[in-house]
Image (cartoon, rainbow, N blue to C red):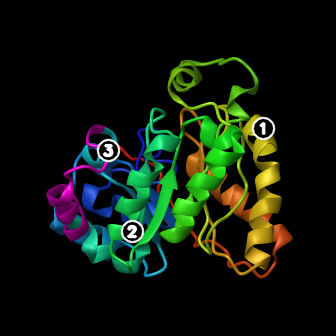
Amino acid sequence: MWTHKAWPGRFLPQPLPASERLRAYAGWCTAVEGNTTFYATPARTTVETWAQQTDPGFRFVVKLPKVVTHERRFAGVEAEMRAFLDAIEPLGERAVLWTQLPGSFGPPDVEALGRFLRRLPADRRRAVEVRHPEFFTDPGSTSLLEGALAEANAEWVPFDTTVFFQSPPTSEAEQDAWAKKPRLPRRTRALTDRPIIRYLGRDSIEETVKGWRPWTEVVAGWLREGRLPTVFVHTPDNNEAPALARRFHNEVRALVPGLDALPEPEPIEPATLF
């Protein structure tokens, strides 16, 4: 996601053609989650514009199609995966293949996941997000999944919602997220040199910032080890997400002074009538 109804005029220039929105977003952040690819494989020409709007170091974490992960559970998806891999090819090594699995995908399904991951192109980074509670609470299931991911050189993506679920929702956006987001323990172990974190805070900036403090230490530790983490900061309404992402980066940079600064966003001109 690189645009949001609350961002134009605040984080993105307004008006702005669709073909330039990613470029403007990339002035705020250096990575993006590709959620739309879950619902439909984009045209290759569209992906080419994504590559053109971003610098070589910009990271894309692109979600595999729903038909592959949720509907067919990796069975008989060769044609769909060929089309998907061809479409995102213009992104090259900047693209991470993000396999997000439903809560019903449990330990008995790990073998199928492993076979699928090992068939992916060797030059593509892989990341997997699971939501079945046993992977987090049962040591045997944790070990089983970690083994399958390690064999395929794939990362385990934690979706940290622990802060969000600490108190009841107070807004319509929080109520919607309360019904949809998974309630799972926080996981802070990285399996590869490119860990990925998805963090969900609250509509309250203060609560969101307080809740991510454990992650700043974890991320700083990874950086000192030579890893290159990617962190996505969400709130239920996502209205302040770009600014919050930069604030998180600044807090980590205070712990790791050698970390490069984020790019400077282009100035937002005030809206005019003419």
Q: Badge 1: how crowded within 10 Å, few (<14), some, or many (20+)?
A: few
Judge left or right: residue 177 versus residue 246.
left
The residue that label 3 is drawn on is 73
Q: Which one is earlier in the sequence, the residue at label 2 or at label 3?
A: 3
Magenta residues, as a range? 71-86
The residue that label 2 is drawn on is 118
Residue type highlighted by circle 1: Glu
Task: Give the alpha-carbon distance from disc 2 to disc 3, as whole Å.
Answer: 15 Å
Task: Give the alpha-carbon distance from disc 1 to disc 2, as whole Å.
Answer: 42 Å
Asked if 29 appears above or below 39 in the picture, the reply is: below
Q: Nearer the viewer, residue 245 or 130?
A: 130
The residue that label 1 is drawn on is 206
Residue 49 counted in the magenta span: no
Give the foreground label among 3 and 1: 3
Residue 18 rendering spot, x and y as whole percentages: 27, 55
Judge left or right: residue 103 versus residue 201.
left
Instruction: Tell me whether circle 3 and circle 1 mark residues in contact (CB < 8 Å).
Output: no
Residue 150 rendering spot, x and y as whole percentages: 56, 68
Q: Nearer the viewer, residue 111 or 126?
A: 111
